[in-house]
Image (spheres, grey):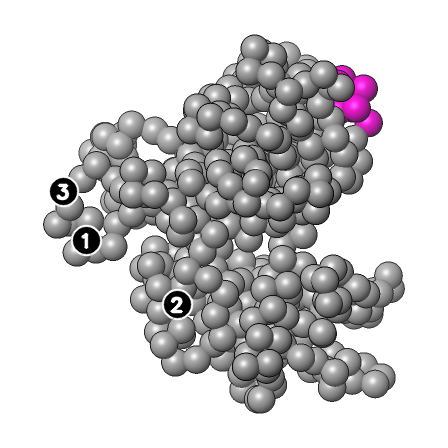
Amino acid sequence: MQVLVFNCGSSSLKFELIEVDDRGGRGQSHLRGLVESIGTQARYIYWRGAEVGLKGEAGHETHEAAARHVIAWMRSLEGNPLDALNAVVHRIVHGGGTIVQPAIIEGKVLAAIEQASVFAPLHNPPALATIRAVTDLLPGIPEVVVADTAFHQTLPPRASTYAIPREIAARHGIRRFGFHGIGHSYMTDRYAEISGRPADQLNLITLQLGAGCSIAAIESGRSVDTSMGLTPLEGLMMATRSGDLDPAIPGFIGRCEGISSEAVEALLNHQSGILGVSGVSSDMREVETAAGKGNQNAALALEMFYYRARKYIGAYMAVLGRTDAIIFSAGIGEHSASARQQICAGLEAFGIALDPERNHAAKGESRISATGSKVEVWTLPMDEELQMARSAAKLVGAAKDG
């Protein structure tokens, strides 16, 4: 099945045309691309196989304009690959309490995405704009939406409920939703394939460590706790997000600095985390370089990042009772051997032991735990696009069979 995947950021749009085989495996990736800096002077680069098919700049003010540009380029190609298209799938950041599994896009689904925009005002509206452009340009092609929050809908009330007055929480839909669900579900499914064990027999701790960072406790293949909450700000320390902090701090900052709650929220999302503590960069590689040259603020930022991730691992091992594997993915998780080593340091008493040589040499899918480690530790490259395409292929295939 040929599936066109759209993945919207607040100012970016990624796409990929993926062939999904009958077993949900990745076939040939025909076309892919990225549009950045939407809203200003957008830059785009599109690939056809291993070759750059188109590259340049355009005045794309909206995601709708970017999506139309992408589809126009595809139609201009010899053989028009869209003629063989079976489905389109869109990622949305927040599905609220309504979109709890992949869904065929129709009126009620669009309304639910709109309603959940209050929790993701920078991400859901661009996704809606992309959906509407695709619907207009590709009428008759089934469209599916996959919410980043959906995988965590299995959180039990003890993990999803905030300790605030029940009436207020119910009135405004305040609960812990969790994010990066597409990534955590991919790690779960892929490890099940690698290990040859059904997902519902596995207890895992999955870490998606990139610019945004989250960790999840997977019990019998289902998410039972995760670090992000109502918004992606809660949890681990991230590139520019603070992660967990005393709830009184935002109000205190607002009063002392004389700034609005919106300005405080922007500070915690865009000026904090590794960037805020190090004063150097939000890029882990640059902070590691600075720390190596003796920058104490950079060294502290790294130590805090490792410590908080290690603390969550310990907590989630307590939640699960039995942990079969710990999985690292995304930019930092997959590529930083030092981060993995420091995060797992001191966890030998919990049955977690890395093999230094395996960890340093790890590329792609790699087991990095020592031979005698009771808990396996792996690195897995992230493939959210394939996970989304699988969901769309399964849903659209089921609808046709029905």
Residue type, numbered disc 2: Ile
Disc 3, SS: loop
Quadrant into which the C terminus falls: bottom right
The residue at the far bottom in this view is 139
Disc on the earlier residue, 1 or 2: 2
Q: Residues within 10 Å of mark 3 (few under 14, many from 20)?
A: few
Provide residue 387's location: percent of width, then percent of height. 63, 57
Residue at point 60%, 81% (across, down): 401
Question: Answer yes or no: do the residues labelled 3 and 2 have beta carbons within 8 Å?
Answer: no
Residue type, numbered disc 1: Ala
Query: What residue is pinned by disc 2?
Result: 113
* Front residue of 16 and 289: 16
Query: What residue is pinned by disc 1?
Result: 170
Disc 2, SS: helix
* Front residue of 35 and 199: 199
Where on the picture, by quarter, is residue 389? bottom right
Q: Is residue 297 above or below residue 150?
A: above
Disc 1, SS: helix
Where on the picture, by quarter, is residue 33? bottom right
| C-alpha distance separating marks 1 and 2 | 19 Å
Q: Identify the mark at residue 379; answer none if there is no mark.
A: none
| C-alpha distance separating marks 1 and 3 | 9 Å
Query: What residue is pinned by disc 3?
Result: 165
Range covered by the magenta-colored residues: 355-361
Where on the picture, by quarter, is residue 142? bottom right
Disc on the earlier residue, 3 or 2: 2
Residue at point 57%, 40% (across, down): 201
Residue type, numbered disc 3: Pro
Provide residue 9's location: percent of width, then percent of height. 54, 58
292 left or right, relative to 242: right
Provide residue 368's location: percent of width, then percent of height. 73, 26
